[in-house]
Amino acid sequence: MKMKMRLFLISVTIFCAIISSVNSCSPADLAALKAIKTGLTDSHLGLFNSWVGTDCCVNWYGVSCDPETKRVVDINLRGESEDPILTKSGQSGFMSGSISPEICKLDRLTTLIVADWKGITGEIPKCLTSLSNLRVLDLIGNKISGDIPADIGNLKMLTVLNLADNQISGKIPASIVSMSGLMHLDLSNNQISGEMPADFGKLKMLSRALLNRNQLTGSIPVSIGNMNRLADLDLSRNRISGSVPDCLGKMQVLSTLNLDGNLISGQLPSILLSNRGLGILNLSRNSIGGNIPDVFHGNSYFMALDLSYNNLKGPIPGSLSAAKYIGHLDLSHNHLCGTIPVGNPFDHLEASSFANNDCLCGNPLRTC
């Protein structure tokens, strides 16, 4: 009887060990997560207090596993969100340290979000480009420095690349155009320099390209005109020169174009101002000259049209009165001359919209 009981207990022990093994996450994933935890310091929220035990697939904050393989597939750590831990604390998160290269051992990872922690430093681990399943890489709002990995284009499955609001320098890697499925690209507010890749237009799936507040130089690649899904292009506050390519005016989906605060010269393309889909156009603070093309029409619908601080001359086009809607219009600080047209949108505009030109007159300025 004792022998049977002993065998029974041994069997139960083995069974429990097997069940535990099946239900817990991969030892390699567990070790990688512990290395990530060691590299980061959460000063007051205690997010990593849940990262204990051997089963990283259950109740580990920000960690998700594949239910069948028990491999880690998502890491989602946001310092600014509506997560109860953050809302209860009444403050946004702050985390310091750096992202350990051991994270690259999570080779089933599809989502990596370590965003808005303000104090995370170091470089982007170059080995991240080996994570072939990665679809979302979001490191916005930290103090990450160094270059974007040169072979970032190896991430063929990536749909979102968000590295905004960091201290990243160097150039945009040429390989970035190989990410054929990329839909959202945000590199804004960094220290990225050099020219945009000439074949940037190969990113045919891209709907948003936000590269503003960097140190980019050179001209706007004409290949962008081939991006049929691009709705939002922001290249503002860089050092971009050359003229505005006509091809931007032929883009049917483009609704927001911000090129303000650059060194752009040449003249305004007529086809750009007559584009029926463009709703926000900001070309202010450049060196654009010539006349404003008189090409506005009944389908022109601008929530914002800002051409201020340029070298534009001649009259304000009368066809602006035919526009279906113009919410905000700024033509100040140019060399415009003549009578301000009457009717919409001019009846609701203030004098500041026309200030500091050579010889404009009429309401809301002085009478002619």
Image (cartoon, rainbow, N blue to C red):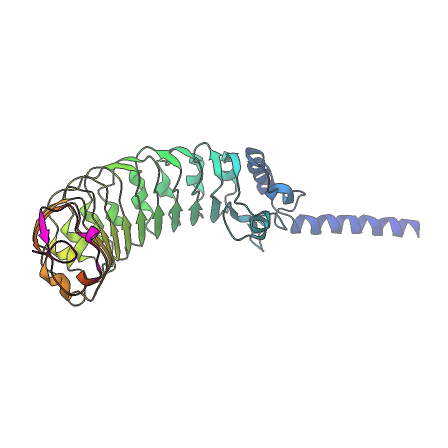
Q: Position of residue 154 (x, y in %)?
A: 37, 42
Q: Give percent across and percent down for residue 193.
A: 28, 34
Q: Camera-side residue: 29 or 50?
A: 50
Q: Main secondary structure of the magenta part?
A: loop
109 in magenta? no
- Horizontal side of 277 relative to 181 (left or right) equals left
Q: Which residue is drawn at the image coordinates 31% and 45% (left, top)?
A: 178
Residue 100 is left or right of residue 222, and the answer is right
Say whether residue 297 is visible: no
Residue 161 in the image: state x and y as whole percent: 38, 46
Q: Position of residue 272 (x, y in %)?
A: 16, 55
Dividing the picture into quadrants, the one containing residue 197 is top left
Q: Residue farthest to the right?
A: 1
Residue 354 falls inside the magenta stretch? yes
- The number of numbered badges drawn on the structure is 0
In-front residue for pair 89/195: 89
Q: Nearer the viewer, residue 135 or 118?
A: 118
Name the image quarter holding residue 240: top left
Q: Is residue 96 left or right of residue 232?
A: right
Residue at the spot 58% in from the left edge and 34% down from the top edge:
38
Q: Which segment did they paint magenta?
A: 348-368
